[in-house]
Image (tube, rainbow, N blue to C red):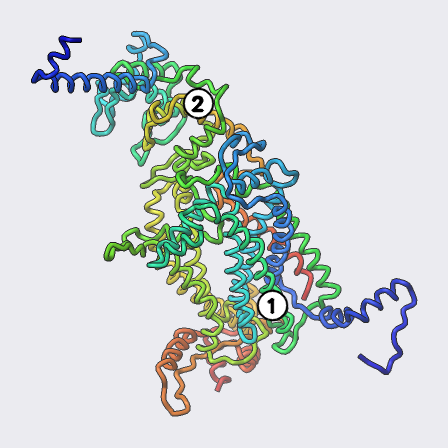
Amino acid sequence: MKALSQRRRHPLTAVALLLMGLLLTGGLYAVASGANEAKAQTSTFSAEDIAEGEKLFIANCATCHGMEAGGTETGPSLVGVGAAAVHFQVGTGRMPLQMQGPQAMEKPAQFNEEETRQMAAYVASLGPGPAIPSEEALDTSDADVAHGGELFRVNCAMCHNAAAAGGALTQGKFAPALSGVSDAHAYEAMVTGPQNMPVFNDATLPPEGKQDILAFLNYIDDNKSPGGAALGSLGPVSEGLFLWIAGLGVIIAFTIWLTSRSS
Amino acid sequence: MSTSTAPYEPKTNVGRITNYVDQRVGGSGMVREFGRKVFPDHWTFMFGEVALYSFVILLLSGTFLTFFFDPSMAETHYDGSYVPLKGVEMSMAYASSLDISFDIRGGLFMRQVHHWSALLFVAAMSVHMLRVFFTGAFRKPRELNWVVGATLLILGLAEGFTGYSLPDDLLSGNGLRIIDGVIKSIPIVGTYISFFLFGGEFPGTVIIPRLYVLHILLIPAFILLMIAIHLFMVVVHKHTQFAGPGRTNNNVVGFPVGPVYAAKAGGFFFIVFGVVALMAGMFTINPIWNYGPYDPSPISAGTQPDWYIGFVDGALRLMPGVWEFVIFGYTLSLNVLLPALVPAGILFALLFLWPWLEAWVTKDKREHHLLDRPRNAPTRTAIGVAGVIYYCVLWAAASSDLIATHFSISLNDVIYWLRALFILGPIIGFVVSKRIALALQRKDREIALHGRETGRIVRLPHGEFIEVHEPLDKYKQYKLVNFESHDVLPAQPNAEGKITKTEKARGLLSRIFFEDRVAPASPAEIRAAHAHGHGEVEGEREKKAEVSGH
């Protein structure tokens, strides 16, 4: 220690201390943010998958995304979007895009699960990105439905509606209804942020939180409205429409019946 | 009353008891007076009844809800049986609303009865007012009762909104936040009023108890008072009726209250209750469990008020956001203040003043107990239609987001179109409906003069083809010719021989109102048309009518 204290007035001390401080914070930050990053590939892809995926990619996707998936004027680069993005976009039928529009529309999937995973493998091989969630990541058996509801209302309801019935965004874009969306696709949407959706990475929303949200969505999907027909879960607009058309309609029919025999 | 006859001696015990009571409360006199009151029959006369019955249902179901609702904003953790909210922090108001929905037998049904009948209450009032407006039932002597009715509508809106806010869920909290924003946009005093109302910064801990007092005590008391006045005046004025053979301005043709109407009205109450109960049993309304507890940070997509407040929400949505000015460091939010107050202000000002406005233009000071068919008052009908379109555009704007998603169109385009329609819609509606009304009047006149076209073509001996017209029976004829048609009344000089500016304005309005008119067919015209036979040729008929007219 003596040697160190002797040199404490050395002209370069300040520089050395600054360097050490920077290294320490930088190192800690790297460790901390590394802990929050999407977990490494859970399913490893074989070289054969990647090769098959590349063939499928060139045949079906390269027109817009480019031969090397580097993007063109009509489609973004896919380097670093991860396998999850491919699995979501192709698995829900949004890709290949049917037509240009405010946003990609859902349609029946054009590829089976195997082909989708092969394309995902190819895109994942281009650069690191969120992986397709594993079985454990989607395990909602010990998830907290109530907590999921809270997270959903704070993070998702402003676009997707509190009952996940969907909602409008600007210029023809919209947040879809979430009824019937598979756990894997919902999870992938959260980690990749498709279309106008923001990314909810593991720093913003830890995996347990995502599982809670999935549990909440499954609960409201499985349990029909306790009050009877839900009228689309769209709130006062559908209720008002129903009252004016069905409620008042039936009552007017009765008024006509009641006064039909007089005068 | 009569002293000449011997006093009534009851023979049975029941008779003695009823006689005892009757001698002390005068029940038989009331039954004699009111029970023989005659009411005319028409299906459009029953909307007021629907409103009254839904109010009774509201009182009954509301009382049930007060047994279990706790209007407190004290914090608690939910421990009821709805899983997705277990352990969530919320107010007692929301927790007790959830308990009513899930843990109290019949509670959810009663909540839904209460909410559906609230929607029906305001809807029935609105339709009732439209009926009264379009048939001219607001004219002398019923102007004040029209004002009472309009007051009831406003009270209904207030009652509805305070009730909507009580469960303290996310949806109603968002609604309150908008009200708070509107209040704060009032220059100078806005912030003070907001702090006074919420007992501090929004949302505070006092607003729910305060709204509760208004909702279950003050506003219902006012509504009851107004209903009493409204019904009393109906009895005093007698009910209006449509013109018909034997139905004149001086009589009322219909059934007496006792027993026919009493039975019908009683039965109708149960029909309305039944319809509401069916809706409550089968269709979810205000699923508060979906919305979660109120928290000022989250806002759900598709957040709307109940339908009757929708037009104000729509006005806010339509308003371009540019009218916000900063003057000497103070913000003047006209982009909030104008849409929140002006469209509703115009609507209700016209609503309240209309009976006097029309009487001023027509200078008509007579009593009217016969109703107009809407086509026979074309300008009034056109103004009514313009008002309905004005309201409906604002109303539609409140669901702009759902229109966009469900018809797959851009939200921005919906707003632009509705903005344009807000200005153009009432104008187009006015012109089109006035033309339709006039055209219908012409058709009526044609039928009154020449009868119904039978479609039977007859060839006359000299070779002419004619279509045989069948004359109307007297009853139908009466309805077609018996109406009042105001004529233009130009500006009149006053006692000093001067034409005042207001009188000039009145004259101008009178011209706009009645310049285009179709007069009812006069007896002379009908005689002339009939004398000519029913199968005349169009040109000849014109000549003949002209001759007989002079």
Which residue is at a point 63% across and 38% down the rendered structure image? B104
**Which amino acid does the dot numbered 1 rest on?**
Ile
In the image, farthest residue toward the bottom: B496
Pointer 1 chain: B
Q: Residue B496, image x and y in percent?
A: 39, 92
Element type where label 2 sits in the image: helix
Q: Residue B388, image x and y in percent?
A: 45, 60
**Which amino acid does the dot numbered 2 rest on?**
Gln
Q: Is residue B359 above or below residue A118?
A: below
What is the number of the mark on residue B469? none
Tell me if B524 is positioned left or right of B185 in this view: right
Q: CA distance from mark 1 to mark 2?
A: 60 Å
Q: Is residue B438 above or below residue B317?
A: below
Which residue is at a point 45% across and 34% down the rendered structure image? A164
Query: Is residue A63 in view?
Result: no
Tell me if A198 is positioned left or right of B21 in this view: left
Residue ID for mark 1: B229
| Circle 1/circle 2 CB separation < 8 Å | no
Mark 2: few, some, or many residues within 10 Å (few <14, many ≥20)?
many
